[in-house]
Image (cartoon, rainbow, N blue to C red):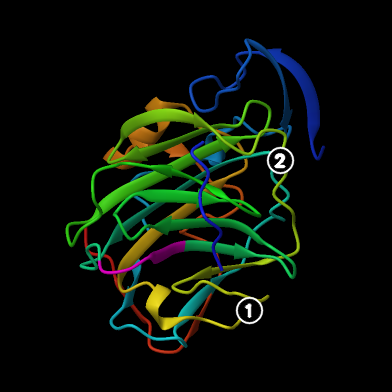
Amino acid sequence: MKLSAEPTCPGLCLLVRGVDSEHSREPKALFAVSLQVNALRNDEFRDPRIVARRSLVFPKETSTSYVEMIPQKPLNLKAFTLCFRVATELKGEREVILFAYRTPGFDELNVWRELDGRLGLYMSGAGVLFDLPQISAMESHVCLTWESITGATTFYIDGKKSLTKIYGKNHTVRAGGKVIIGQDPDNFVGDFDAKQSFVGEINRIHMWDIVLWPNSLQDLFSGKRTLIAKVFDWETTEIKVHGDVQVIDDEL
């Protein structure tokens, strides 16, 4: 269920200036970050030669087909970067759910393609919309960043940055839910509406619990070495397929 949009520490805690500034950003020059002791070792970065070949194809409109993604850490988030590659031929025909994270009581974090083609982020209520290049049958690389301190929210399409909007200031995304690809759950996991289901292909779904710098997102789009995602890493994240969803090789 979607409400109308408004216009509108584990590890070692350090107070640092510009730590890992090539890959993450914060709204102030002096900021607090939570780092694992080995956070900047080489094994924290993705070798671009190692790419998961799986891709999810949703061939038709249904109220039964979806994929559950099992997070590698709880989605208790004050900031995030979410990226995926997506293609669909649904053009202005209806709303399309692209990413859904639902807890028992709330739509915690949903990303929609709206009826008019805009992309929208919704977190536990009304959302924020962006007028961006249309998603089509040609694959697009979509990234979305958000952080709670300022509410700064930004989309990136094929490595290009949108304007920043302010949304969800001081909000926290709560843990304890399920991530669903392909359907919008109106209860914890169920009550799907076929007219909101995803039809098309989606892959390389990554999620970090930090905001990545624009140059890192451009590198990700270009297939260069990037920081391994800690919430969802497409190369290692477990998925559970339900219904008519085809898992195919993602040929490069």
Figure check: 108 above or below 230: below
Q: Nearer the viewer, residue 87 or 188?
A: 188
* Residue at 60%, 19% in the rendered image: 27
The N terminus sits in image quarter = bottom right
Q: Residue furthest left?
A: 138
The C terminus sits in image quarter = bottom left
Stretch of the chain drawn in magenta: 93-98
Q: Is residue 62 visible in this depiction of the protein?
A: yes
Q: Nearer the viewer, residue 236 or 200?
A: 200
* Residue at 69%, 45% in the rendered image: 77
Q: Nearer the viewer, residue 18 or 46?
A: 18
Distance in Å between CA atoms under marks 2 and 1: 23 Å
Please tell me whether mark 2 sits on a helix, a strand or a loop: loop
Horizontal side of 77 relative to 136 (left or right) equals: right
Q: How many marks?
A: 2
In the rendered structure, find residue 171 and report the number of the disc placed on it: 2
* Residue kind at label 1, given as amino acid type: Val
Q: Quadrant of residue 139?
A: bottom left
* Residue at 54%, 19% in the rendered image: 21
Q: Quadrant of residue 31?
A: top right
The percent coordinates of residue 56 (x first, y second) are: 36, 72
Q: Is residue 76 magenta?
A: no
Figure check: 59 above or below 178: below
Which residue is denoted by mark 1 in the rendering? Answer: 189
The percent coordinates of residue 71 (x first, y second) are: 63, 61
